[in-house]
Amino acid sequence: MFLYNLTLNRPSGIQCAIYGNFSAPKAQEIVVSRGCYLELLRPDDNGKVQTILSSNVFGVIRALAPFRLTGGLKDYIIIGSDSGRIVILEYSKEKHAFVKLHQETFGKSGCRRIVPGQYLATDPKGRATMLGAVEKQKFVYVLNRDSAANLTISSPLEAHKSHNITFSVVGLDMGFDNPVFAAIELDYADADQDSTGEAASEAQKHLTFYELDLGLNHVSRKWSEPVDNGANLLMAVPGGADGPGGVLVAAENFIIYKNQDHPDVRAVIPRRTTLPVDRGVLIVAHTTHRQKAMFFVLVQSEYGDLYKVTLTYREAAVSEIKVKYFDTLPPCSSICVLKTGFLFAASEFGNHALYQFQGIGDDDSVESSSTGLQETEEGFQPVFFDPRPLKNLVLIDEMDSLCPITDMKVANLLGEEIPQIWALCGRGSRSSLRVLRPGLAVTEMAVSPLPGAPQAVFTVRRSQTDEFDAYIVVSFTNATLVLSIGETVEEVNDSGFLGPTPTLRCQLLADDSILQVHPGGLRHIRVDRRINEWRTPGRRTITKATSNERQVVIAMTGGEVLYFELNALGQLAETERKDMAGDVACLDIGPIPEGRQRARFLVVGSYDSTVRVLGLNPEDNMKALALQSTPSPPESLLLLDSPQAGTSGEDTRLGSLFLHVGLANGVLLRTEVDRVAGTLSDTRTRFLGTKPPKLFAAKVGGSRCMLALSSRPWLGYNDMGRYTLTPLSYEALDYAWGFASDQCPEGFVSVAKSTLRILTLERLGETFNQQTAVLRYTPRKFVIHPDHRVIIVAEADHGAVPLAQREDLPGPMNIENGAIQEPGFRGPELDEQLGALEQQFGGMRGGQAQWASCVRIIDPTSLQTHHALELDNNEAAVSLCLARFNTAPEEGALLCVGTVKGLSFYPRRADDGFIRIYRLRDAGRRLELMHRTPVGETPGALTAFKGRLLAGCGNILRIYELGKKKLLRKCEHRKLPTHIATLSTLGDRIFVGDGQESFHYMKYKKADNIIYEYADDVAPRYVTSALQLDYDTMCGADKFGNIFMTRLPSDISAQVEDDPTGGKFAGASNLLQGAAHKLEDIINFHAGDTVTALQRAAMQPGGREVILYGTVMGAIGALLPFSSREDVDFFSHLEMHLRQEQPPLAGRDHLGFRSYYFPVKDTIDGDLCEQFPQASAEKQQSIAEELDRTPGEVLKKLEDIRNRVL
């Protein structure tokens, strides 16, 4: 078996975000790292954050830093990664890519303790950078420019110190003095030698300054002083002419200003009144905002509270620190302040956000000051505050994030054309159930009923210089309605359009006159309101029409095609006519290229299943230049320019011209048209739906794109230099046209049945659009009930306060048998106002080993909660399944929930474990507890098995039967290594995924009532998710980011089945304390992120089955099995060439990355193959020649294999 790995949805969580001017001097941009992806984001004029570029670096991005050379106008990006190399990147606007400027090797690859890459700090003046490891090693690189103004980098200068753990590194602002870097360090040399542990308890953190002497080219430890042992973060204070310099140390509950030869200035961090006394306040993110006369630091605590830190100073002496409560946001991994007055918040979990400043905290909010610090017997006096709704910030935009996906299933619960992906995402009060549909999200701007069912709709501007449309023209079977676009959309009668006839086409011409094509002729409305009419000869009528601003082509009954051009007098003059020997089905003419007088080609589709390309140049005389036969009669045509053929600056070829043909059988053909000769080549096909696609041109993302209307709408557009055809998540439309107005700069006006709709797209480049149901606690697992078709979710949060004990919720709680009865008090997530505050502030914090948990029933159609049942007794739901029991067939499928009481970690301990059995009442809208059975261990996995329940309790595998008052234990197996993480069954076979020791294949022998093991894996794998593929094969993923498949060899499988003992005695004669037989690895692949869910599904009608996986960072990927050896050879050779020609950006070896823990086996990396279009034209040509193909054929293969998945 060979698999093709393809990322369908890029990781959406953000680990690190930096702000700078990366593409141009005044550009306000953010670079973020998402797993192994590096992305450039830019807020547009409307405040929407757009993804400009996304690049897979095939490595672990551990740290990012921007820097700018002295006097420079653009920022560079330095990456600290797992490659053992420092890499400096620049964003190239011409190539639309990150360009690697320098790559210097300093150590081994991998995330190691003593190999630098974890910490990165730059000198504010752009003269040097420090790269630090968690332990021992630090390198300093001097950055400069040569005579040609190119960036140069020095050899590394060492600043190592053995037995030293580093917690944070920052570059100090020293003006133009020697660069200085500060680090929080802990020396453990004494603790390492002391076996009693006393030295470890007395170990002291130090703040150390490292100075780079630019004259001597040497790094020295300049100064070191003990610092609070709770110190975790350093923030540089502006120096030189901008401020006092030095560093702010964020410690638990305090912010301390420190500098050499300066006394400490300490201020307490204000804390919430509801926070338990034993919980401290740690700062997790910070950003500094500078203005000419002042600066301030915004810091965020682990609870999400933002504080504004200001210093009172004279020259280099700081006299006071003020820490003022600013606002509360969800906890972030990074925050960035843009100079345009925006704050970008990269959330740890849940959606990221862009806020606008309404104020800078100059109000009377709670403030602590170093001058008001009071010391008591118990320590320093804390300052308290209550979080409030946003005051200084206002939300402008949100970026959807699935991080983390905790469980995922694919099911068509809504009866749509394609199945939906149901994913549990988020943590705590920001948790959600997301419904993902392939396609772009569509926003309805307006919906208006119309007097009848329209046939077509168009938009027209008043003049060529206008930015927005002036009229919407709606055509009915016997009339034309003209609507004026202003503050409101109103009908007008003085537009000059002919009313009592349908309109086939309308066009604004180059001289600002308007053309209306109707069945009886052409109506030319001049700028001065004079009207010229051209009528059809005899009883013939116009059936089809196409036009641009200078050319008009009409087709009449009988198949005659007439060509008109706008002459110098502003008149439409008939230039040529041609008899097509049969009625014309469709025609299209492209827009006029820049600097040309006319479009070169006319395309005509006939009912005899042919498409002809005719030349419109005077010398061509509408001569047929090319002909293409189609498998079905063409219904619609569209000529469209592709994105630029080459992405490198030296590639000057124009982008290709493509002809799109919508066929009667629902297929879209895409054929390349030679710009000079007009010949057709390289035809690609895509099935769009059951209706013949109607094709329309519209403007999206600043460029011309294609809207195809079939049984669902599709959009073909340019996404980051690549042509993408993706469905729109909207109902079927009958007709559409591009639309632009003040409120909707880029949208569509469309008709569906008897309604007029104005639509716009939310965010381009997204593979899936989402609907969200808000949850109360972190979701753990969910199941879909096959009969009632409802979703049942198990939620649990550690260190949270259960609903019954919440004092901050209004009104009394009425709780009976663990179920909340009063609908008004079912939890904050079910009240819009309370839910918004809960998401902003987070839930109440509980103590250690305190849990809050519930089981929820959700209606998949409305995403409303039918029933949320809180668990009492400090229990947390950790697993669930549906099971039908032989002893109670009348009950149907019962819900089995595994719970654990008082679970704590480090070490992992629990008071007890239980299995709760619920029956569903009221057609699946309510849960009723039948009984609860103690099991003594954590029930980590449950599944149905032959009319019984199979439970993994700790490392014990048990079979239970349903009793009247509790579950009855019937059989158990006690010899599994650590902790049962997954369970699946087929026939008599049981497949167990162990928490540390991979898969174990087991068998249940009914006659002896015994479970025994007959096969296991040779590699220790920390299984996080599993998927059973067949009787012998399991697909699994471990917590280190590996996806693997294990298979029992067929001869051994047959031997186990044929053995009269069922392999019982073979299992008893174990090998090295393992099973008698060993599993074989048939697939190994490193995904680069912890996979939490595996599902097998076909994502399109009649499509191939693929394995879908979801990850902690919110990525969704697919593994597609190859069907032919020819494809395997082609893609493996393409992958091999791209490894050489397109080395990863972060400096990591691609083969080494995909073989991080186990050598990659029989899996081809589609993400690397899809970087082929980003290579320069010369590289594309040389790689294609090595593969005995043309670049177009390679691109077609890449497009085809992606289309097999989505």
Image (tube, rainbow, N blue to C red):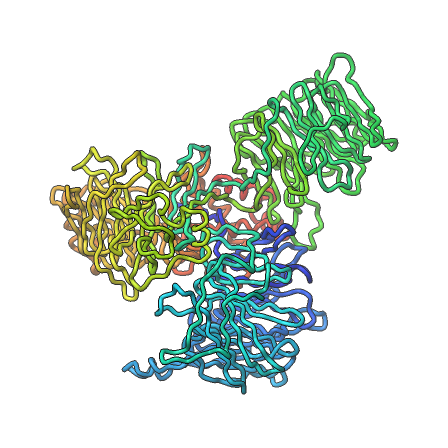
Disc tally is: 0
Residue 724: horizontal and vertical position, in percent? 58, 42
On-image quarter of the N terminus: top left
Residue at the left extreme, as displayed: 1008
Residue 46: horizontal and vertical position, in percent? 63, 50
Residue at horizontal 41 percent and vertical 43 percent from the top = 422
Give the left or right position of residue 882, taking residue 973 as reference: right
Q: Quadrant of residue 485?
A: top right
Q: Is residue 26 above or below residue 794?
A: below
Residue at horizontal 52 percent and vertical 70 percent from the top = 120
Q: Quadrant of residue 703?
A: top right
Query: Can residue 1084 be seen at all in this image of the molecule?
Result: no
Nearer to me, 262 or 543? 262
Nearer to me, 691 or 997? 691
Query: Can residue 866 be seen at all in this image of the molecule?
Result: yes
Residue 746: horizontal and vertical position, in percent? 65, 42
Q: Is residue 798 above or below residue 188?
A: above
Residue 128: horizontal and vertical position, in percent? 60, 75
Nearer to me, 823 or 158? 823
Residue at the top extreme, as displayed: 539
Residue at the bottom extreme, as displayed: 261
Residue at horizontal 26 percent and vertical 42 percent from the top = 895
Residue at horizontal 66 percent and vertical 59 percent from the top = 27
Give the left or right position of residue 178, taking residue 868 as reference: right
